[in-house]
């Protein structure tokens, strides 16, 4: 995985870190590489989660993340629309955040940051995209010395308490299954 490729976050993966106030892990791991699709920013601008948008605004104003939109009529927008409306044979319609992350990563040679494996795995494989989950990001943070395994356990538990779907009961379980 390229150490310079941008990471295009979907709503779920980004919000996992925002909910537990650990977005600084992203900024330390991926400086200058965090891209938030405008669609994801809009989803997190819902009044029910406006505190999450405020945390994104802090990342943006500090230059630790950037927003990226898709112009109507461009190949990236056309691909995005296809993913959310009529993806074709054998493919499921996916959410706007996942679709934006996939389309932008595909066009820009980036990495998709998403936990929604059920919806995106076929696209990731078909388009030969690189992919990170919240677990993979925390593992990167562990390997980089940003967190310890016990800190990862606490973060993981907090994410689960915030009803984030991570696929494993503990960070240690994730590490054991994903060496």
Image: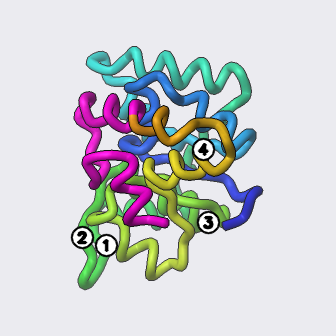
Separation of marks 1 and 3 at Cα, in angstroms: 17 Å
The answer to whether mark 1 and mark 2 are in CB contact below 8 A is yes
Q: Residue at x 56, y 44 (%)?
A: 69
Quadrant that contains the N terminus: bottom right
* Residue receiving disc 1: 87
Separation of marks 1 and 4 at Cα, in angstroms: 35 Å
Mark 2 / mark 4, whichever is N-terminal: 2
* Residue 117 appears in view: yes
Q: Which mark is residue 107?
A: 3
Q: Please state which of the two labelled residues, at mark 1 or mark 4, is closer to the viewer.
A: 4
> On screen, 139 above or below 178?
above
Separation of marks 1 and 2 at Cα, in angstroms: 7 Å
**SS for dot 3:** helix
Q: Which mark is residue 92?
A: 2
The crowd level at tag 2 (other Cα within 10 Å; few <14, some 14-19, many 20+) is some
Q: Start and end of the magenta stretch?
A: 154-179
Separation of marks 2 and 3 at Cα, in angstroms: 20 Å
Mark 2 / mark 3, whichever is N-terminal: 2
* Residue receiving disc 4: 141
> On screen, 64 above or below 55?
below
Mark 4 / mark 3, whichever is N-terminal: 3
Q: Quadrant of residue 59?
A: top right
Mark 1 / mark 2, whichever is N-terminal: 1
Picture coordinates of residue 142 (x, y %)?
Answer: 58, 45
**Of residues 146 and 106, which is closer to you in this image?**
146
Mark 1 / mark 4, whichever is N-terminal: 1
The crowd level at tag 4 (other Cα within 10 Å; few <14, some 14-19, many 20+) is many
């Amino acid at each position: 995985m390229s150490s310079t490729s941008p990471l295009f976050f979907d709503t779920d993966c980004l919000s996992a870190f925002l909910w537990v106030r650990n977005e600084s892990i992203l900024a330390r791991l991926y400086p200058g590489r965090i891209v938030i699709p405008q669609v994801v920013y809009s989803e997190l601008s819902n009044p029910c989660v406006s505190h999450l948008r405020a945390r994104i605004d802090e990342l943006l104003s500090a230059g630790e993340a950037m927003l990226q939109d898709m112009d109507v009529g461009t190949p990236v927008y056309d691909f995005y629309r296809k993913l959310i409306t009529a993806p074709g044979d054998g493919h499921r319609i996916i959410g706007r955040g996942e679709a934006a992350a996939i389309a932008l990563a595909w066009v820009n040679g980036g990495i998709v940051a998403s936990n929604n494996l059920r919806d995106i795995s076929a696209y990731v494989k078909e388009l030969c995209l690189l992919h990170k989950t919240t677990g993979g990001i925390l593992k990167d943070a562990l390997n980089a010395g940003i967190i310890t395994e016990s800190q990862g356990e606490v973060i993981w538990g907090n994410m689960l308490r915030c009803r984030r779907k991570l696929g494993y009961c503990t960070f240690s379980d994730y590490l054991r299954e994903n060496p």
